[in-house]
Image: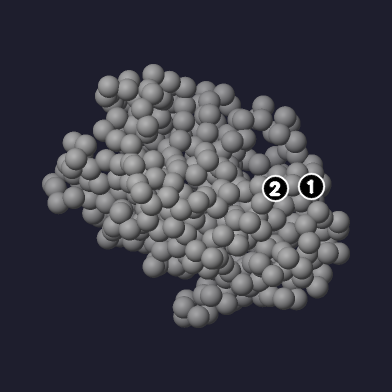
Amino acid sequence: MSDLKNIKNFNYSLEKIFPEAADFLPIMGTDYVEYYVGNAKQAAYFYKTSLGFQSLAYAGLETGMKDRTSYVVVQDKIRLVFTTPMPNDENQEIFEHITKHGDGVKVIALWVEDARKSWEETTKRGAKSYFEPRVEKDADGEVVKSGIHTYGDTVHIFVERKNYNGTFLPKFEKWESHYNPPNCGLKFIDHMVGNVGWGQMNIWGKFYREVMGFAQLISFDDKDISTEYTALMSKVMTNGNGRIKFPINEPAKGKKKSQIEEYIDFYNGAGVQHIAVATDDIVFTVSEMKKRGIEFLYVPGEYYDTVGDRVGEIAEDMELLKSHGVMVDRDDEGYLLQIFTKPLTDRPTLFFEIIQRKGAQSFGKGNFKALFESIEAEQARRGTL
Ligand code: FE2
């Protein structure tokens, strides 16, 4: 199972792949994703309004958090934290992160049974510590946290919350808001993709394999992911129970600039490229988000001339999918529906993918060409192709 380049011949099942992942780092799921942003209040408002998140928790001057303000929003199992620095000498890291990267993901927090052991096992295997295990307490109990660095300035924080009953974390209070737009049907994070620089994909694949005990689910080379003009390579790493999937992309040589290189230029380094969120009803999710101002990548109309032949029978009405620009792909286990937003930030960096899996466990390889041609059209408009 070492060479998984050809997805068509790779009929993986979760039972088969999991034993490859080591069990020294059991992860129950994504705990939260924290962004460092220039204006946390407005970012939270945007994610509530346009993506259907609900108010969950707040920390700031009023809760004893002096150096930063954080708003936490939730939608089913997805928790996002938006953090902005207050004038203070203790938090230069946040100011520098925002200056260098613009708004972006700083923390991919992982929910673990034992945050001390997670830190020990990973640092022992070569992870650089972000902070040592520490206990945070309030009247609702205690949380143990620890952290390690991953690609770029991104970090993983291990969160152990079995002795905690509060809304989110100590120092946070419940955020009661009179403004509660309905949700958009987002359920959980399906995968989160990191973009790394030239020649770095294998290094970070090795990091997730050796330091985090992940297994490689699949890999795509530049022949799989290229158009006439641009290319990239990707490896998908997964933890033992498959709840965490981290594809790692690096640019590849083409006639024009790879979208991964454009990202690296504007993010000033490696970082999170997209968060893929699962829905049970992609047409509902996409219609809601469009109504609320989210822009999606345009899929050329010709895509739908041949997609039916490629994916065969599906339950959804293809005309309806076409009207929303939803793409379809099939693998040995079923099919999937997916669509990508335009960047959600000023810089062409972070975007969301909406994905509905109908059996398929893959990543839409059959859509890569149409998708990347669409991204190239956007790059050309930005003058960065
Ligand atoms: Fe994706």
- SS for dot 2: strand
Q: Residue furthest front?
A: 178
**Number of callouts in the render?**
2
* Label located before the other in sequence (1 or 2): 1
**258 left or right of 8 in image:** left
Comparing 341 with 199, the one in front is 341
Comparing 64 with 204, the one in front is 64
User: Disc 1 vs disc 2: Cβ atoms closer than 8 Å?
Assistant: yes
The image quarter containing residue 287 is bottom right
**95 left or right of 203 in image:** left
What residue appears at the point 79 percent right and 44 percent down from the top-left corner? 333
**295 left or right of 369 in image:** left
Q: Which mark is residue 288?
A: none
In the rendered image, the quadrant that contains the N terminus is top right
**57 left or right of 288 in image:** left
Within 10 angstroms of label 1, few (less than 14), some, or many (20 or more) residues? some
What residue appears at the point 74 percent right and 47 percent down from the top-left corner? 358
Residue corresponding to mark 2: 357
Within 10 angstroms of label 2, few (less than 14), some, or many (20 or more) residues? many
Amino acid of disc 1 = Gly
Q: Is residue 152 above or below residue 21?
A: below
Tell me residue 16's x, y (percent).
Answer: 73, 31
Tell me residue 257's x, y (percent).
Answer: 52, 72
What residue appears at the point 27 percent right and 51 percent down from the top-left corner? 84
Q: Which mark is residue 334?
A: 1
What residue appears at the point 30 percent right and 54 percent down from the top-left corner? 41
